[in-house]
Image (cartoon, rainbow, N blue to C red):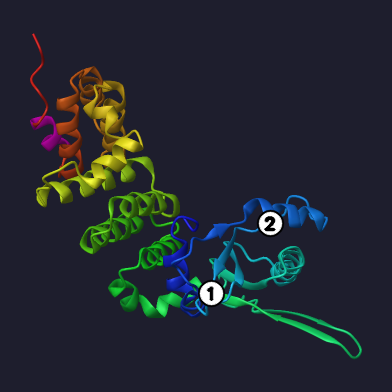
């Protein structure tokens, strides 16, 4: 996602750097060059998340290598590694290097903003460009107003941390973020990429995931979309809708039984048996909606199709 949305990423997290780049020129990503430089430095498999060569706005044929590293765990060696990577890249390309870090770890006290190496009379200091995602907790209202896709990325990350171990609350937060995605009117590509990211950072137990899918689908139906919805495209891409729409009855039946187990674990065996015998995808889909909204097992039984003769 960082490569595909490189410009909005810099504009959101590092606007000063973005402001010096001439975006009329293509960005050149240097993955192979970076890996080669690291190997020459004797550091084998250690790689950097993203390295790009860009043109500056001052008209000079100068380039900037932008070095991004997203850390999800505390890594005390990060400043030294950033210095080593910077040195290797500069030695190879003979260009200035911007060393930028996006820190996604949950430790508010960890802020590695520089690398220092002091001798008796000499001293080396590398100041890093660092963004700490936790700091955006105090800027929540600002994130809600910001149309950048990375504002939603940050919101999803923060809510993922806040709702760890609380799946019901995570379901609510995930649904709210999806509603916000619709309000912002993202492009189809942006929507699908953000939906994937949302699923990645805010996973749910399967029954709640199915409930989330249905809630979003209902939301779209209420908006009376005239064309195939973005959500339908996403769920079909993920193999969710196929289980129902394309006749995969077994998958649809499993969805119904999983939802039933989650909401009513003491459901009578006779009702479970009747559900297991259903072989119509349309009936199973209708029952899935009923189970999500039912107030009792009796409500479900009242909506069961009549036995075939």
Q: Position of residue 95 (x, y in %)?
A: 68, 71
Quarter of the image with the C terminus is top left
Q: Is residue 272 above or below residue 67?
A: above
Q: Is residue 150 visible?
A: yes
Residue tagged 1: 56
| Residue 279 appears left or right of 95 | left
Is 193 or 180 nearer to us in this picture?
Answer: 193
Q: Is residue 296 above or below residue 80?
A: above
Q: What is the tally of numbered marks visible in this picture? A: 2
Q: Position of residue 215 (x, y in %)?
A: 21, 48
Residue range highlighted in magenta:
297-302
Q: CA distance from mark 2 to mark 1?
A: 20 Å
**Residue shown at the point (75%, 57%) measured from the top left:** 37
Question: Is residue 298 a member of the stretch shown in magenta?
Answer: yes
Of callouts 2 and 1, the N-terminal one: 2
State the SS at label 2: helix
Q: Specify the label residue 34 is tagged with.
A: 2
Question: Is residue 84 a member of the stretch shown in magenta?
Answer: no
Q: Is residue 271 above or below residue 48?
A: above
Is 145 or 218 nearer to us in this picture?
Answer: 145
**Residue shown at the point (22%, 43%) measured from the top left:** 214
């Amino acid at each position: 996602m960082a490569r595909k949305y490189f410009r909005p990423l810099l504009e959101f997290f590092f606007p000063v750097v973005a402001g010096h780049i001439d975006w009329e020129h293509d960005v050149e990503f240097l993955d192979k060059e970076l890996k080669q430089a690291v190997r020459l430095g004797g550091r084998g498999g250690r790689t950097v998340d993203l390295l790009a060569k860009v043109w500056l706005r001052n008209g000079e044929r100068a380039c900037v290598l932008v070095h991004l590293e997203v850390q999800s765990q505390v890594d005390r060696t990060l400043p030294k590694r950033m210095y080593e990577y910077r040195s290797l890249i500069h030695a190879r390309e003979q260009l200035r290097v911007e060393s930028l870090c996006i820190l996604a770890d949950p430790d508010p006290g960890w802020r590695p903003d520089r690398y220092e190496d002091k001798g008796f009379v000499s001293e080396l200091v590398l100041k890093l460009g660092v963004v700490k995602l936790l700091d955006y907790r105090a800027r929540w209202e600002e994130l809600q107003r910001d149309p950048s896709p990375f504002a939603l990325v940050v919101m999803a990350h923060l809510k993922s941390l806040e709702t760890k171990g609380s799946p019901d609350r995570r379901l609510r937060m995930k649904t709210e973020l999806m509603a916000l995605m619709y309000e912002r009117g993202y492009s189809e590509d942006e929507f699908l990429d953000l939906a994937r990211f949302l699923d990645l950072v805010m996973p749910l137990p399967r029954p709640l995931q199915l409930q989330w899918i249905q809630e979003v689908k209902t939301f779209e139906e209420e908006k009376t979309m005239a064309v195939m919805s973005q959500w339908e495209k996403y769920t079909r891409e993920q193999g969710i809708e196929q289980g129902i729409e394309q006749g995969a009855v077994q998958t649809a039946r499993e969805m119904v039984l999983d939802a039933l187990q989650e909401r009513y674990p003491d459901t009578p065996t006779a009702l479970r048996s009747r559900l297991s015998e259903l072989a119509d995808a349309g009936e199973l889909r209708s029952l899935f909606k009923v189970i999500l909204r039912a107030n009792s097992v009796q409500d479900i039984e009242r909506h069961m199709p009549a036995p075939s003769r």
